[in-house]
Image: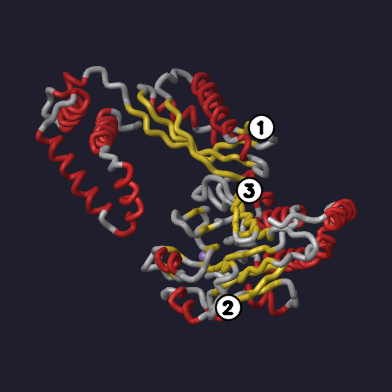
Amino acid sequence: MHWPNLGELTIRFYSLNLIANKHAYRRVFSDLIYMPIKILASADLHLGKRTSGIDVFSDDCSTKLTWKRMLDYACRNSVDVVLLAGDVIDRNNRYYEASIALQEGFARLKDAGIEVFLVSGNHDFDVLPQVIRNHSFDNVHLLGANGHWEISRFERSGEVIQFIGWSFPKQYVTTNPVLQLGALQTDSNFLRLGVLHTDVDKVESRYGPVPLLDLQNADIDIWMLGHIHKPSNFAGEKIIRYPGSPQSLSAKESGRHGALLLTVDQSRVEVEEISFSNCRFEWLNIDVSAVDSQETLRLLVENDLSLAANLKLTELGETVFLVYDLHLNGQNRRCREIKAWAEPLKNDYDMPLATGTRVLVREVSANIRPVIEDHEVLASETSPAGLLAQTILALRNGNSTPFLEELIRDWERNFRTITNSTTYQPLQEQWQREGNPRIAKVLIEQECNRLLNELLFPSN
Ligand SMILES: [Mn+2]
């Protein structure tokens, strides 16, 4: 930390008053006052697209508006660099809407003195270089065009960052781009920030597959990646992250979505998650065992949804739509009626929270077990239902039957086969640390109940 002397403090005082958020002025003083560098890192914006899955979204959930919120944030918070790790423009949607929004954004960032470093991904391998070529933005730097690694030095307030990137040269790339990185000369005295659109640990992928180990071993200090829309963070000493798509584009992209703010202070780097998506998808299990009328179902759903949504209240800053998929479960003899009572929730439910966020329901699924009065009587039958009832009873009483033993052996054999595949390597490592969850019996009981339900109450 560099402590300012009196002169510098005076300048800081005046500059703070003069600037009053005028970003450009900050640049004038930035050589006099030490300030950490702020990088807003994002990927997979897919400009031209909008969130799908529920009618009420309309144009409010277009990524063009997410981009605008990101620009507002960058300008308001004196960000120095905006970083985009590919698939900025969506290949199949509204090219003009996308390219115009991008150009306007670049111009706005230029006015604010903000630099942009970016690489292209499989969606914008051709259009992104075009947009940048056809409009001269001297603050915008496409790294690694034509699939050749490139380094660009950024310097401000005496701090130096090397942005090192590689751009998709064509739609599909089946080779590992990091293998070519070794030839590039970097300076280990200054931070090396790698930007890459890639499918980590997916050997068969057509989207620039890279083993995680190669990212860990490369002469790069931080990796900001694109392609996977769910924000993710790889464990280990090095910061290796997918910022994820800043807008949730469908219910498959659940949870919080936004960008990462990296603050580089000397050699220390802090990472903060900033939300930008105006919609957020979640799912919720609701136990309907006690439901006996449409009214009790309504009360229960309202209560559970309100509890779940309010728990997220502090994270809902920009969220306009909080959209739930409900899974109804439990044990109830009115399975069919409950499903019918729940049906209107999909189009009808719309609850406002204190933040102004609207809670909606997108989908309702049900896995309600029937109430079987007497398993003992059923178990005396030799029918398939009898066999299932015997198995359920054995599981409940801690006994075993030859059929149950066979099921457990089958389950364990299949489970081993699956978990021995490389795809599940991280899970295996987790289980080695935390113990393998041996839940065969729980799953078998669930499945026996489900099958018994189908057999006894076929219309449910
Ligand atoms: Mn991609």
The answer to whether 380 is drawn above or below residue 204 in the figure is above
Q: Is residue 45 visible?
A: no
What SS does tag 1 mark? strand
What SS does tag 2 mark? strand
The three-letter code of the residue at mark 2 reads: Glu
Which numbered marker is on residue 275?
A: 3
Considering only order in the chain, which callout, 1 or 2, is on the residue closer to the N terminus?
Answer: 2
The three-letter code of the residue at mark 3 reads: Ser
Q: Is residue 95 visible?
A: yes
| Alpha carbon distance from label 3 to label 1 | 20 Å
Quadrant housing the N terminus: bottom right
- Comparing 89 with 209, the one in front is 209
Considering only order in the chain, which callout, 2 or 3, is on the residue closer to the N terminus?
Answer: 2
- Residue at the front extreme of this rendering: 5
**Residue tagged by mark 1?**
352
- Comparing 100 with 372, the one in front is 100
Quadrant housing the C terminus: top left
The answer to whether 405 is drawn above or below residue 53 in the figure is above
**Residue tagged by mark 2?**
150
Q: Left of 438 or right of it: where is 333?
A: right
Considering only order in the chain, which callout, 1 or 3, is on the residue closer to the N terminus?
Answer: 3
